[in-house]
Image (cartoon, rainbow, N blue to C red):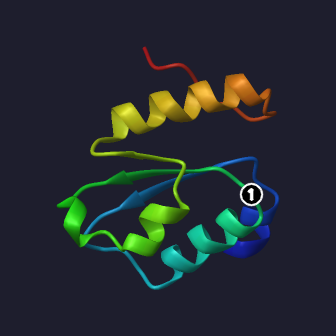
Amino acid sequence: LDLKKLLESDYVLAYWDKYISGGTPGEITVAYYKKIPVVLVYNMGLSRVSEWVLGCSEAIYPNLVEGINHYRELARELGLRKHLPDSE
């Protein structure tokens, strides 16, 4: 189900923390090969994030607020059909 949804997506916002599962790096790799932009947000030392995953990511942020802001701007720039709601 995750891969099916991924392949229907315009972009991916991935959250990387100490609870990361084995499926997430694979999904990020699939997105990269399908040219689906990946915005990566990490919640641990950057040195603990897979170099492969870093290379598959269009943008990398240390916090969710910056990652979501980039994500919104990417959606606007590319004219993508799905947008995150504006924060209040």
Image point (41%, 80%), residue name: 21
Q: Residue furthest bottom?
A: 22
Identify whether 73 is placed above or below 1: above
Q: Quadrant of residue 6?
A: bottom right
Q: Quadrant of the C terminus?
A: top left
The amino acid pointed to by label 1 is: Lys
Crowdedness near tag 1: few (<14), some (14–19) or many (≥20) residues, C-alpha within 10 Å: few
> Along the horizontal axis of the image, is 5 left or right of 37?
right
> Along the horizontal axis of the image, is 12 left or right of 24?
right
Where does the image place residue 61, in percent across and percent down from the top left? Answer: 35, 43
Where does the image place residue 69, in percent across and percent down from the top left? Answer: 47, 27
Image point (54%, 19%), residue name: 86
The residue pinned by badge 1 equals 35
- Which of these two is toward me, 71 or 53? 53
- Which of these two is toward me, 33 or 63? 33
Image point (50%, 76%), residue name: 25
Identify whether 75 is placed above or below 28: above
Q: Quadrant of residue 36?
A: bottom right
Where does the image place residue 66, in percent across and percent down from the top left? Answer: 37, 32
Q: Residue furthest left?
A: 45
Image point (50%, 74%), residue name: 24
